[in-house]
Amino acid sequence: MTNTKKSIHGEWSSRSAFILAATGSAVGLGNIWKFPYITGENGGGAFVIVYLLCVALIGIPIMIAETMLGRRGRENPVHTMQVLSAEADADKRWHYLGWLGMAAGLLILSYYSVIAGWASAYVFKAFSGSFFGADVTAVEQLFSDFVGNPMQLIFWHTLFMVATMLIVARGVGDGLEKSVRILMPGLFILLALLVMYAMTTSGYFQGIHFLFSLDFNKLTGNAILIAMGQAFFSLGLGMGCVMVYGAYLPKNISIAKASIVIAAVDSLVALLAGIIIFPIVFTYGLNPGSGPGLIFETLPIAFGSMTGGWLFGVLFFVILVFAALSSAIALIEPTVCWLVESKGITRGLACLQSGVVTWLLGFCTIFSFNIWSDVKIFDHTLFEALDYLTANVMLPVGGFAIAVFAGWMMKQQHSAQELDIPSQHYQIWLFLIKYMAPAAVFLVFLHVMGVL
Ligand code: TRP
């Protein structure tokens, strides 16, 4: 039997459109904002290696599995899991995986949008020349004044959520596909320029050393979990994003090849961001572990001191906002897709409903940087707790379930048919998805809980 069902939302127009959109979902704040600051907080090199291992051994196989489940089910994550578990004679409760994913997506978007709002505000700061000749203290002051002001953060968060909802409301072809065609090449050009700048700084080698030297003493159990969580976050796995993007994928496209390309581009962008940021950190004596403000406290110095920095600063933050937009639309798409398919409402209304919920949730993050900065859950601010819960718990649990379903529940004849790759390659994937990925996620959890 061949599966000829199509998604009611339409399909990607070509292989390159899918790769672009999936890369757009993968490349975002996770690469440029989050990767550098958590690498800084977790000691550098050894963390980076663990991260890359997680991408290769857990991330890529799960990405292939998640896309495959989506393309076979062709619906929102909840229905897809219902259809596929029926087909596999598996327990019906597998569809809870879809719910977990949608919840994770909205929670992540609630803080993602706040940070994307920071990037949007920085476009205007760059434009108005605020970075010109600014030294470390000035840049740090600028940042702490900014995040200390809830009204400003609310304004930018609102703007970003509205933009996200407007794009998603326009649908798969028009909204999602078009926005990434111009952005990705632009992002690469600007990153290359900034790498060249970083090479001229006096802290270049120290920065590179920090990023690539292997000091495993600095690696704690929790850091391993964070590296794994970051692999899920950066590839956008474990919550149904990739699954719905797979649902819009035409039959004749190789899922395996596309996944490898996407993961490679994603990791490259993260490493480039590190290669840009750490040399600046060491040149100006900043603290690599200063947290979520890291790129907002380092890059402005670069833009403020280099020739043409005004223009590059504006362009950089514009591109960062667009990269965030192409990820934000992916985060909300599973919920929108589910609302449209199961409640029969229009796409516009579905966007509005899920957008408002996410927007309201975003206030937790906004206030955790100012008026609620003392509110702590186990020593974490609300933002940190949300981030930890989603990236380091919900996504790995979702990814684990996807691996178990694809490797153990689904009939091999079906997965082989969907993937359509040479049998040796299929065997490698099967080994990774059946044993490697679930075992790795499980062991990391045991390790963090102190059992191992
Ligand atoms: N991967 C994106 C980034 O790195 C964010 C993102 C998109 C995401 N889809 C996701 C994160 C799904 C977790 C799950 O910025």
Image (cartoon, rainbow, N blue to C red):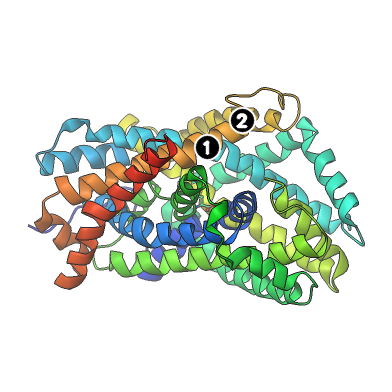
Q: Quadrant of the C terminus?
A: top left
Give the residue furthest to the left.
1
Q: Is residue 242 placed above or below 307 in the rendered structure?
A: above
Give the number of callouts. 2
Which residue is at a point 20% across and 52% down the rendered structure image? 5
The CA distance from mark 1 to mark 2 is 9 Å
Q: Position of residue 430 (x, y in %)?
A: 20, 59
Which residue is at a point 59% across and 24% down the rendered structure image? 377
Specify few, some or many for label 2: CA neighbours under 10 Å numbering under 14, 14-19, or 20 or more: some
Which residue is at a point 43% across and 44% down the rendered structure image? 333
Specify few, some or many for label 1: CA neighbours under 10 Å numbering under 14, 14-19, or 20 or more: some
Q: Which residue was labeled with disc 2?
A: 380
Q: Are marks 1 and 2 in contact (CB under 8 Å)?
A: yes
Q: Quadrant of residue 235?
A: bottom left
Q: Please state if 69 lies on the left or on the right of 19 as rendered.
A: left
Q: Secondary structure at mark 2?
A: loop
Q: Is residue 360 placed above or below 109 in the rendered structure?
A: above
Q: Amino acid type of disc 2?
A: His
- Using the image as rendered, state which of residue 444 and residue 274 is in the foreground: 444
Q: Is residue 80 placed above or below 66 in the rendered structure?
A: above
Q: Which residue was labeled with disc 1?
A: 388
- Using the image as rendered, state which of residue 305 and residue 183 is in the foreground: 305
Q: Earlier in the sequence, mark 1 or mark 2?
A: 2
Give the number of the disc on residue 270. Answer: none
- Using the image as rendered, state which of residue 375 and residue 165 is in the foreground: 375
Which residue is at a point 41% across and 57% down the rendered structure image? 54
Viewer can see residue 393 = yes
Q: Is residue 16 placed above or below 51 in the rendered structure?
A: below
Q: Quadrant of residue 360?
A: top right
Q: Please state if 207 lies on the left or on the right of 345 as rendered.
A: right
Q: Position of residue 415 (x, y in %)?
A: 17, 57
Viewer can see residue 273 = no
